[in-house]
């Protein structure tokens, strides 16, 4: 453990806001790394070097340059858990600084201890992140006895089968905001399920929970959605399909990711399970260029604006199970106007949306069009 520069400067700033004394913080080499006097930073302090070298509890200095680079004052050894980390120097006569010297010393040691604790927690969080990422990518061969023990040391219990929930925000945010949202959702997830662990990867937030039953998992996802909404955060969440053990976590992650992607395609659905999706099972295997060619083939001769209008009409038509009345109401047009739109689509494409045979063609077209749009691919 050592006193780092940024850490020392933060401590000097904190102390200087409440106490007027001039103070210096020196590292174990006797170099002043933080000071209320900026000109003394990076200079050598011979008194501090002696404190460290001879393991002195304190050293009084009565005259300027009694030791190289020193001024009258007292220098105190700083220790955290019995380990020397540096020296605190307070300028002034011993009698004037004595009443507050121990207060400053203890305050400094406590601040260093707290910052060291925070650093260790950050490191632990990083190690958990790496472990969970490895687990998701290599779960089939990852769960050896050594890795299970490594998980235990990271406070992750792999003896219990896990389920996967993948979430992301419904609109782009800055990396800083994403990290802030991740921290909020991680805390809420652990409030709901104390054993839950979460990582942030590729703008997605992955939750590994020991909640097994499907309805309870959906309830878990819904609580996260409601919590996020109450804090002004829009979420979409995808759920995996139940698996017998943790060797299938990579597969479960892919399932939840596909379910999440389906939420984005639909637009009006915010939580979806893998068991609820259909074309997503194989649509990822089809290149966007092939999807675009298929859309162009069916809607040959359409301008981008005409295509967007036709897609909007067809989406609404299929959303209302082919009901002319309900579709016309949803589009705020007369039933006869809707019939004209559908006949026009049939005449230009050669496929009648009102026909059961042709509806399958348009279902695929709508699916591909949404994929192209989500990917930002030109139509």
Image (cartoon, rainbow, N blue to C red):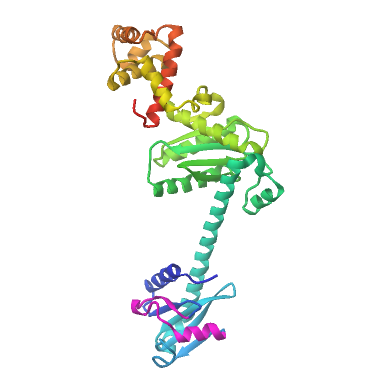
| Residue 34 in magenta stretch | yes
Q: Quadrant of the N terminus?
A: bottom right
Name the one closer to the observer, 338 or 345: 345
Compared to residue 269, the image places residue 99 above or below, namely: below
User: For residue 269, what is the image quadrant?
Assistant: top left
Seen at 65% across and 52% down, the residue is: 150
Seen at 30% across and 15% down, the residue is: 301
Residue 179: horizontal and vertical position, in percent?
A: 44, 48
Task: State whether residue 320 appears in this view.
Answer: no
Task: State whether residue 130 appears in this view.
Answer: yes
| Residue 15 in magenta stretch | no
Q: Quadrant of the C terminus?
A: top left
Residue 364: horizontal and vertical position, in percent?
A: 44, 18
Name the one closer to the observer, 96 or 342: 342
Q: Is residue 71 left or right of residue 81?
A: left
Residue 115: horizontal and vertical position, in percent?
A: 49, 65
Q: Is residue 72 left or right of residue 260?
A: left
Seen at 42% across and 23% down, the residue is: 291
Q: Is residue 82 left or right of residue 378?
A: right
Magenta span: 30-54
Residue 249: horizontal and vertical position, in percent?
A: 61, 38
Residue positioned most to the right: 145
Compared to residue 335, the image places residue 191 above or below, namely: below
User: For residue 141, what is the image quadrant?
Assistant: top right
Q: Is residue 112 left or right of residue 332?
A: right
Seen at 63% across and 41% down, the residue is: 139
């Amino acid at each position: 453990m050592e006193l780092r520069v940024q850490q020392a400067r933060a401590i000097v700033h904190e102390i200087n806001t409440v106490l007027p004394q001039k103070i210096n913080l020196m590292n174990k080499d006797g170099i002043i790394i933080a000071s209320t006097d900026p000109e003394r930073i990076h200079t050598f302090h011979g008194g501090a070097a002696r404190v460290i070298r001879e393991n002195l509890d304190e050293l009084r200095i009565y005259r300027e340059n009694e030791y190289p680079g020193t001024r009258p004052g007292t220098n105190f050894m700083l220790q955290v858990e019995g380990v020397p980390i540096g020296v605190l120097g307070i300028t002034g006569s011993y009698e004037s600084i004595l009443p507050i010297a121990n207060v400053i010393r203890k305050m400094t040691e406590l601040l260093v201890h707290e910052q060291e604790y925070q650093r260790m927690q950050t490191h632990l969080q990083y190690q958990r992140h790496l472990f969970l990422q490895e687990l998701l990518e290599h779960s089939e061969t990852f769960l050896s006895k050594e890795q299970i023990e490594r998980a235990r040391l990271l406070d992750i219990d792999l003896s219990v089968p896990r389920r996967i929930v993948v979430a992301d925000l419904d609109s782009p945010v800055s990396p800083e905001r994403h990290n802030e949202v991740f921290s909020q959702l991680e805390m809420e997830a652990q409030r709901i399920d104390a054993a839950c662990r979460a990582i942030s990867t590729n703008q997605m937030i992955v939750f590994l929970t020991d909640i097994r039953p499907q309805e309870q998992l959906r309830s878990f996802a819904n609580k996260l959605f409601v919590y996020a909404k109450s804090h002004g955060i829009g979420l979409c969440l995808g759920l995996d399909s139940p698996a017998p053990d943790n060797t299938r976590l990579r597969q479960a992650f892919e399932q939840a990711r596909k379910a999440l992607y389906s939420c984005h395609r639909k637009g009006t659905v915010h939580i979806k399970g893998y068991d609820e999706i259909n074309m997503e099972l194989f649509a990822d295997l089809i290149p966007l260029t092939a999807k675009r060619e298929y859309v162009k083939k069916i809607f040959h001769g359409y301008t981008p604006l005409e295509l967007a209008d036709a897609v909007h009409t067809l989406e609404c038509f299929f959303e209302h199970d082919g009901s002319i009345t309900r579709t016309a109401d949803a589009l705020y047009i007369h039933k006869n106007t809707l019939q004209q739109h559908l006949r026009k689509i049939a005449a230009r494409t050669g496929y009648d949306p009102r026909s059961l045979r042709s509806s399958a063609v348009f279902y695929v077209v709508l699916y591909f069009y949404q994929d192209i749009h989500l990917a930002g691919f030109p139509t």
